[in-house]
Image: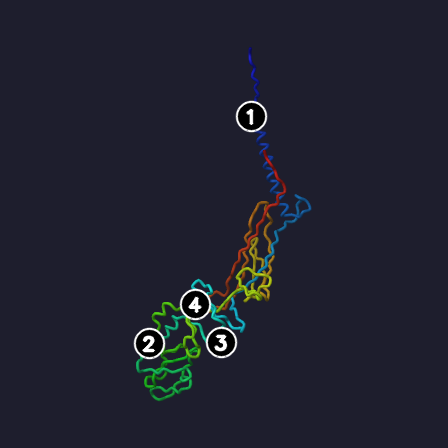
Amino acid sequence: MQWYVPVIQLNLSALRWLCLLRLGLRLWLVLFVIFASGAAHSFPFGGLLKGGEYIHQSELVTGAVYARDIIKGENDAPILVEYDLEGNEVKALGEHSGRYADTRIMSITEYNGYLLLREKVENLYAQKFVLLKRNAYENSLLLDQDGNPINKKALLPDTLFVWILKQEFIVPDENYILLEVPVDPYLSPFTVELNTLRSLLVSNTSGKIIYKSHNNIGYRTGFIVNPKSGEQSTFRRKFDDELLNPIAYAKVFAAASGKEFTSTTDELGKYRIEYFNPPCPGIEITYHNPIIAELHYSRFHPGKKERDIYGCPAYVNCFPVKLFHFYYT
């Protein structure tokens, strides 16, 4: 018996055309979804794919521009605190009033420097100088070695003690002031304590040390404070928080779409900027739009910049609209 085996002859040319057709259909479907999603973001909703006016993505940003400021206590005086080397507050001394009313903050290095200068001057001009308090100097009549009165030089604002040459060593029209200090000149220079102490509170009238600290002494400062709770923060603000040092009428601008969208802070340091990004292209994308504040300064010397800018990053995530779902098996 002869067996017949059925054979199916395939037309390979037709099969290739069929594969290309299916691939083309899938490509058109993908392009259709992308175009439809982009159209939904870019054009009015009068029709899904109906052409219309090009529409940007509108964004609104609100914020504030502010700086650090000194926090005052109940008596409207700055609060003295101690800071560690990392800048953390470790101890509160109280307001800069009462016991500390007439004091100044000074580093142990500066105070010790005055004492070392005193030793140097007294050794260099031994038996040739006179040490006077400020009042004694200002009320005295100074004569040069020829017996003629001299025009006294004004002392520095914080000078408490001054070393001047004796009359027999004062040459006309030459300097006669050897040293001025705002500290107690009768102390010996620090030795052991110099390695442990960091800051002092020094009397403005006597130059004596009122308080010593192993930390840095400074005023309590902050950016944002809640008037009710006293809670402080730096960046996050609640609706009832108070800006300690708002910067009014500062230029603020957003960089988007290759342009500057400009605004100005109000009297409370707050701003509101509306800017535009390109429409969502139908795929997920993140627009980076920095918010920049421009601040002007008074120059201390000709080489210093008159203005500086401070930036805050802003991000806008754009997600495509999922209009259709296609499943392939």
Q: Which residue is mark 1?
A: 12
The picture places residue 21, in percent across and down from the top left corner, at: 59, 32
Query: Please, what is the three-letter code of the amino acid marked with disc 2?
Result: Glu
Q: What whole-number distance in Å separates the C-alpha atoms at marks 1 and 3?
A: 102 Å
How far apart are the two marked residues, 1 and 4, measured between alpha carbons? 87 Å
**Residues at discs 1 and 2 in contact (Cβ within 8 Å):** no
Task: Return the residue at label 2.
Answer: 119
User: Closer to the camera, 19 or 226?
Assistant: 226
Q: Are marks 1 and 3 in contact (CB under 8 Å)?
A: no
The quadrant of the rendering that contains the C terminus is top right
**Residue drawn 66% across and 44% down?**
48
Q: Which numbered disc, 1 or 4, marks the residue closer to the eye?
A: 4
Task: Characterize the local packing of mark 3: few (<14), some (14-19) or many (20 or more) Cα atoms within 10 angstroms.
Answer: few
Disc 1 on helix, strand or loop? Answer: helix
Residue that numbered label 4 is attached to = 216
Tell me the CA gap for discs 1 and 2: 108 Å
For the residues labelled 3 and 4, the Cα–Cα distance comes to 21 Å
Q: State which tag comes first along the sequence, 1 or 3.
A: 1
Question: Quick one: quadrant of the N terminus?
Answer: top right
| Sooner in the amino-acid sequence: mark 2 or mark 4 | 2
Residue type for callout 3: Gly
Q: Are marks 2 and 4 in contact (CB under 8 Å)?
A: no
Classify residue 301 as left or right of residue 128: right
Residue 98 image label: 3
| 3 or 4: tag closer to the N-terminus | 3
- Of circles 3 and 2, which is in front? 3
C-alpha separation, residue under disc 2 versus residue under disc 4: 27 Å
